[in-house]
């Protein structure tokens, strides 16, 4: 059996591995159990924020709070942008980041084949973009987002 | 020597099978697991992507100024267990580079100091730029070759793109440069620019599963060095930062991988 050349004390590496392993599990568990973020009127855990961020559906507002970006407005703007349609409101244009120009639309578009891609003529797809689900309202008498 | 070649081919076949399996798994959209990152370099904007890219998550959370505890936990967990084993056996972009390596060409050497570029990319384009300039198109995702290959090009075929813009040409140029690099330098992107590979490399020396050399039995024949595609001498630099744990060198009986 191969015996590696010992360059450190025998207990330091196993102890370090245990600490790292426990820390990693602790981070994951802590996020699953304790962490939630207020996004508008709803609360999202880290998994929700991850999914929202993939489609750029959440952003930091001017006041520093997280807020969701309207999907309908996003989809409509995505339709209009490449076709040179009437200008969007200035506030929306300024807010939209220019990141991921080529994959930006793909990130903004949900994985939904029924959502018509902007600029593409596809007569088969006639359904409009999916409506944004109604935000969940917190129960009466409770904090909107326990943290 | 014939036995070593046979064992090497078995390991390589197993590695290809594993990499293809992971590639298929990452492209099952009905899994709908994009709220969790897969610890590999794969773009979550791919039309079929089932999981999130850890770099994309880090960038998005840095933009939102939130600490991604789950993503960091997953990366630390995977690194602690196997170091860069993910790079050698699971990463789809690594699989692409392994196949490009087979193109007959003169293989070039690169100085190991170029590996520090990975940490510049990690600290700058992944963490600092989205944190200090949120919304600006200068993050790693805006230049990512994996994103170009797995997202920009497929979506362009599906009719979702902004046309032949400067950014499109920039991304294509970067992708072509990375492909050319992979042809002439084994795992060139992994060794010089991949921030995820740079992160996992930090765990290589002390991960739970790692390589071990039987120094007493080593006769310095150099066979393990010839088997290594990363130009590492496993006898001298076992568990090097650049080692992707492809395990080709373990066909030499003096080198083993295991819990040690």
Image (tube, helix red, strand yellow):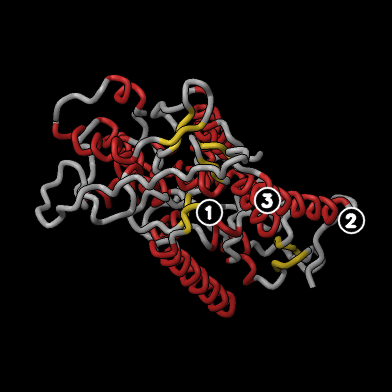
Left or right of B246, for residue A27: right
Residue B81 placement (x, y as % from top left):
69, 59
Left or right of B141, for residue A48: right
Cα distance in 3D space between marks 3 and 2: 35 Å
Given the image, what chain letter belongs to the residue carrying mark 1? Answer: B
Given the image, what chain letter belongs to the residue carrying mark 2? Answer: A
- Label 3: few (<14), some or many (≥20) within 10 Å? few
Q: Nearer the viewer, residue B48 or A145?
A: A145
Q: Nearer the viewer, mark 1 or mark 2?
A: 1
Residue B229 placement (x, y as % from top left):
53, 57
Provide the residue designation for mark 3.
A33
Provide the residue designation for mark 2.
A10
**Secondary-structure class at tag 3:** helix
Q: Nearer the viewer, mark 1 or mark 3?
A: 3
Q: Is residue B170 visible?
A: yes
Given the image, what chain letter belongs to the residue carrying mark 3? Answer: A
Q: Is residue B233 visible?
A: no
Circles 3, 2 touching at the beta carbon (< 8 Å): no
Cα distance in 3D space between marks 1 and 3: 16 Å
């Amino acid at each position: 059996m191969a015996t590696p050349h010992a360059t450190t004390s025998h207990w330091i590496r196993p102890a370090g591995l245990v600490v790292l392993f426990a820390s990693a599990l602790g981070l994951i568990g802590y996020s699953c159990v304790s962490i939630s973020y207020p996004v508008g009127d709803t609360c999202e855990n880290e998994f929700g924020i991850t999914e929202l961020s993939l489609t750029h559906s959440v952003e930091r507002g001017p006041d520093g709070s997280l807020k969701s970006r309207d999907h309908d407005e996003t989809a409509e703007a995505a339709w209009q942008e490449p076709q040179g349609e009437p200008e969007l409101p200035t506030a929306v244009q300024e807010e939209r980041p220019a990141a991921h120009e080529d994959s930006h639309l793909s990130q903004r578009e949900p994985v939904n084949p029924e959502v018509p891609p902007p600029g593409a003529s596809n007569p088969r797809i006639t359904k409009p973009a999916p409506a944004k689900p109604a935000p969940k309202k917190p129960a009466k008498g409770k904090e909107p987002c326990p943290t | 020597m014939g036995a070593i070649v046979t064992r090497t081919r078995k390991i390589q076949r197993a590695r290809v099978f594993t990499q293809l399996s992971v590639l298929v798994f990452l492209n099952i959209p009905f899994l709908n697991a994009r709220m969790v990152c897969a610890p590999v370099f794969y773009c979550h904007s791919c039309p079929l992507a089932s999981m999130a890219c850890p770099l994309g998550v880090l960038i998005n959370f840095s933009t939102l100024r939130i600490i991604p505890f789950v993503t960091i936990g997953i990366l630390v967990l995977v690194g602690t267990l196997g170091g860069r084993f993910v790079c050698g056996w699971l990463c789809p972009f690594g699989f692409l580079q392994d196949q490009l390596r087979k193109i007959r060409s003169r293989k070039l050497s690169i100085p190991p100091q170029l590996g520090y570029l990975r940490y510049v990319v990690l600290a700058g384009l992944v963490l600092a730029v989205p944190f200090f300039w949120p919304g600006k198109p200068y993050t790693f995702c805006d230049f990512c070759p994996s994103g170009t290959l797995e997202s920009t090009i497929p979506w362009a075929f599906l009719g979702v793109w902004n046309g032949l813009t400067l950014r499109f040409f920039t991304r294509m140029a970067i992708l072509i440069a990375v492909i050319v690099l992979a042809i002439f330098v084994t795992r060139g992107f992994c060794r010089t620019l991949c921030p995820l590979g740079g992160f996992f490399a930090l765990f290589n020396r002390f991960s739970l599963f790692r390589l071990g050399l039987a120094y007493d039995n080593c006769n310095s024949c150099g066979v393990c060095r010839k088997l290594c595609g990363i130009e590492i001498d496993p006898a001298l630099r076992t568990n090097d930062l650049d080692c992707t744990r492809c395990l080709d060198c373990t066909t030499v009986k003096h080198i083993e991988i295991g819990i040690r």
